[in-house]
Image: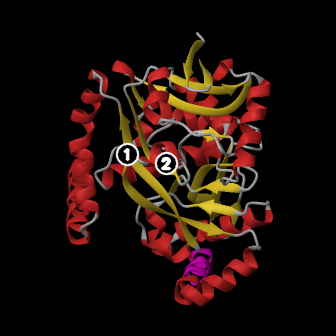
């Protein structure tokens, strides 16, 4: 059901994603382009529409001035009006899509949306309305391949010559010892996708982390994006085969120019060949040839990201809280745990010990 409200100088309609008109989707994309932000698939209307099909609380606030849209704010609404970014936990770019020059008060926007809080963990840079509520700034490494893969590998050799040389040598050894190596950039292979999910679930359990593929909505979302033909937001399954079977795979959404590094995994039986890194280099080469300019590796530390990246984007984690019961409930339920994670993350030795503990717990669960 459509809701209407007012914020100073603006009319706000709160709609379900399936209530957005084709003109709204077109305007959303035009405003996004006009803003100069990267064409990240997570802030495309197609991604919000897909999340809306698996998360019933998904809504979009349409901001209007003089009857014309000037912004779109996608969100999810839970109990007590507690809100979160669309696809929180798997979305790597979050915020509002606003025409340049539009200014918002975050708490007033939440009030007209019926939200007591709004949580984000990958707020993109330039989101002034929400950035003031950020608790932490994070690095999100990216790989720039707009000048072509050859130019990228020149830069990679200059920065990490040993890394590139060793990865290519392992690919040759994989071919000799396991069988012919074949790579498919945009595979339509349900069996490979199932294998990817099984490998990734096992990795989550092994490292003591929550299994995302045990959450039905994430599995369904992957399926929907995999079926999408929308060039601005569709899933791409890339698979590395050796000896006729999958040994590594990646699934992630792409727009025309940005590919998100989302769910990578590999067969541990082939771990000594580093098939995940072989896959990634092959994927970067194919993506560059396919018009991709940026591969977003996502926030979170990883040694391979440091080797492959060309620069870092800045993203932000935090929550906007209104002084209402639902906002207080959110703070009490989430902020102590968030503060503890920040404390550990900024102390490398403690973070390493925590990671080893999680991995040991994961091994115990597998016994």
Badge number at residue 123 = 2
| Residue 181 versus residue 214 in the image, above or below | below
Q: Earlier in the sequence, mark 2 or mark 1?
A: 2
Q: Is residue 343 visible?
A: yes
Disc 2 packing (10 Å; few <14; some 14–19; many ≥20):
many
Q: Is residue 153 magenta?
A: no
Residue that label 1 marks: 318
Residue at horizontal 51 percent and vertical 77 percent from the top: 307
Residue at horizontal 28 percent and vertical 51 percent from the top: 208
Magenta residue span? 167-176
Q: Is residue 266 visible?
A: no
Q: Position of residue 56 (x, y in %)?
A: 51, 20
Q: Main secondary structure of the magenta part?
A: helix
Q: Nearer the viewer, residue 44 or 166?
A: 44
**Quadrant of the frame with the N terminus:** top right
Instruction: Specify the quadrant of the image occupied by residue 233.
Output: top right
| Residue 262 versus residue 302 in the image, above or below | above
């Amino acid at each position: 059901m459509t809701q209407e409200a007012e914020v100073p100088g603006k009319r706000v309609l709160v709609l379900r994603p399936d209530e957005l008109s084709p003109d709204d989707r077109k305007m959303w994309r035009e405003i996004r382009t006009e803003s100069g932000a990267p064409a990240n698939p997570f802030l495309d209307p197609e991604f919000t529409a897909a999340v809306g099909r698996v998360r019933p609380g998904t809504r979009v606030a349409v901001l209007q001035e003089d009857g014309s849209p000037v912004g779109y704010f996608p969100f999810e609404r839970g109990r007590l009006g507690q809100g979160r970014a669309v696809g929180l936990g798997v979305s790597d770019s979050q915020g509002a899509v606003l025409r340049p020059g539009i200014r918002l008060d975050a708490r007033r926007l939440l009030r007209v949306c019926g939200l007591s809080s709004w949580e984000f963990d990958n707020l993109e840079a330039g989101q002034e309305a929400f950035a003031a509520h950020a608790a932490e700034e994070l690095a999100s490494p990216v790989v720039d391949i707009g000048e072509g893969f050859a130019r990228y590998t020149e830069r990679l050799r200059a920065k990490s010559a040993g890394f590139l040389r060793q990865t290519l040598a392992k690919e040759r050894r994989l071919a000799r010892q396991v069988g012919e190596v074949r790579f498919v950039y945009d595979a339509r292979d349900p069996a490979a996708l199932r294998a990817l999910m099984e490998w990734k679930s096992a990795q989550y359990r092994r490292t003591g982390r929550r299994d995302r593929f045990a959450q039905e909505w994430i599995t369904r979302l992957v399926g929907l994006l995999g079926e999408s033909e929308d060039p601005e937001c569709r899933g791409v399954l890339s698979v590395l085969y050796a000896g006729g079977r999958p040994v590594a795979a990646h699934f992630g959404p792409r727009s025309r120019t940005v590919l998100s590094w989302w769910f990578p995994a590999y067969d541990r039986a082939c771990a000594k060949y580093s098939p995940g890194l072989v896959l990634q280099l092959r994927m970067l080469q194919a993506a560059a040839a396919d018009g991709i300019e940026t591969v977003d590796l996502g926030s979170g530390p990883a040694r391979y990201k440091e080797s492959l990246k060309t620069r870092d984007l800045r993203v932000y984690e935090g929550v906007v809280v209104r002084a209402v019961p639902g906002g207080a409930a959110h703070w009490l339920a989430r902020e102590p745990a968030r503060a503890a994670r920040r404390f550990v993350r900024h102390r490398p030795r403690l973070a390493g010990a925590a990671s080893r503990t999680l991995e040991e717990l994961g091994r115990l669960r597998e016994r």
